[in-house]
């Protein structure tokens, strides 16, 4: 491969990376989780209102998103470490209900799964996974774009501290 071709390939990789990072940085840092138009896994209209008074770990994800799938075991480990009914782990996808159900059945993660009934882009989310941690009043206290090691002490402690407030 010629130097010019290597340079061109490198240039495009850098450019695409910069664009992708900028889109991720543009994700909305605020969200009103209780106004999200969602459905449960049976297709019934639902609301996150049922979790008012609890700390909500809200993860926007998709079955086709490799980083989303990669972080699910970390989310499960965090859920096991927090081990309280005052923290609920909610995963929301804007994919077809059948796609979400097939994934949930296959993987058997113990989260609250919902379907977002509109595009995540309408909510200002352009890069996933996107996670919001809400306090018991429903206020966003943490907004994180990209996969994380959610089982790390800093995240588990944050969730436990919020649940005890």
Image (spheres, grey):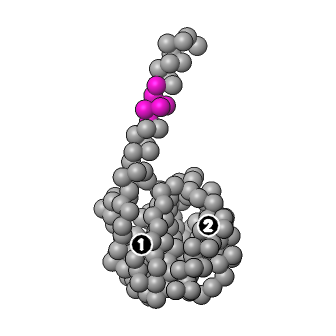
Q: Is 40 displayed left or right of 119 in the figure?
A: right
Q: Which residue is mark 1?
A: 140
Q: Residue at x 45, y 71 (%)?
A: 141
Please provide percent x and percent y for residue 93.
46, 66
Quadrant hosting residue 105: bottom right
Quadrant hosting residue 164: bottom right
Q: Nearer the viewer, residue 92 or 13?
A: 13
Q: Nearer the viewer, residue 63 or 73?
A: 73
Q: Which mark is residue 6?
A: none
Q: Residue at x 45, y 64 (%)?
A: 143
Q: Main SS of the magenta segment? A: helix
Tell me the quadrant of the picture where the N terminus can be found.
Answer: top right
Residue 23 in sight in this render? yes
How many other residues sit within 10 Å of disc 1, few (<14), some (14-19) or many (≥20)?
many
Please provide percent x and percent y for residue 123.
33, 64
Quadrant hosting residue 107: bottom right
The answer to whether 39 is drawn above or below residue 20 in the figure is below
The answer to if 50 sits in the magenta stretch is no
Please provide percent x and percent y for residue 20.
43, 43
Q: Is 26 displayed left or right of 42 in the figure?
A: left
Part of the protein shown in magenta: 11-16
Say which element carries label 2. Answer: helix
Q: Which residue is mark 2?
A: 154
The answer to whether 44 is drawn above or below residue 123 in the figure is below
Q: Residue at x 46, y 88 (%)?
A: 53
Say which element carries label 1. Answer: strand
**Sooner in the amino-acid sequence: mark 1 or mark 2:** 1
How many other residues sit within 10 Å of disc 2, few (<14), some (14-19) or many (≥20)?
few
Q: Could you tell me how far apart the alpha carbons at marks 1 and 2 are, in whole angstroms?
A: 17 Å
């Amino acid at each position: 491969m010629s130097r010019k071709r290597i340079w061109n390939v490198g240039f495009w990789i850098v450019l695409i990376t910069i664009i992708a990072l900028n889109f991720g940085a543009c994700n909305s840092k605020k969200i009103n989780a209780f106004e999200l138009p969602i459905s449960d896994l049976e297709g019934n209209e639902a609301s996150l209102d049922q979790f008012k008074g609890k700390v909500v770990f809200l993860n926007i994800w998709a079955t086709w998103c490799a980083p989303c799938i990669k972080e699910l075991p970390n989310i499960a480990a965090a859920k096991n470490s927090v081990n309280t009914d005052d923290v609920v782990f909610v995963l929301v996808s804007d994919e077809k209900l059948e796609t979400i159900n097939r994934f949930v059945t296959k993987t058997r993660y113990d989260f609250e799964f919902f379907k977002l009934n509109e595009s995540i882009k309408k909510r200002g989310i352009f890069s996933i996974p996107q996670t919001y941690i809400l306090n018991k009043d429903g206020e966003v206290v943490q907004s994180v774009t990209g996969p994380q090691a959610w089982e790390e002490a800093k995240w588990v402690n944050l969730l436990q501290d919020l649940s005890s407030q």
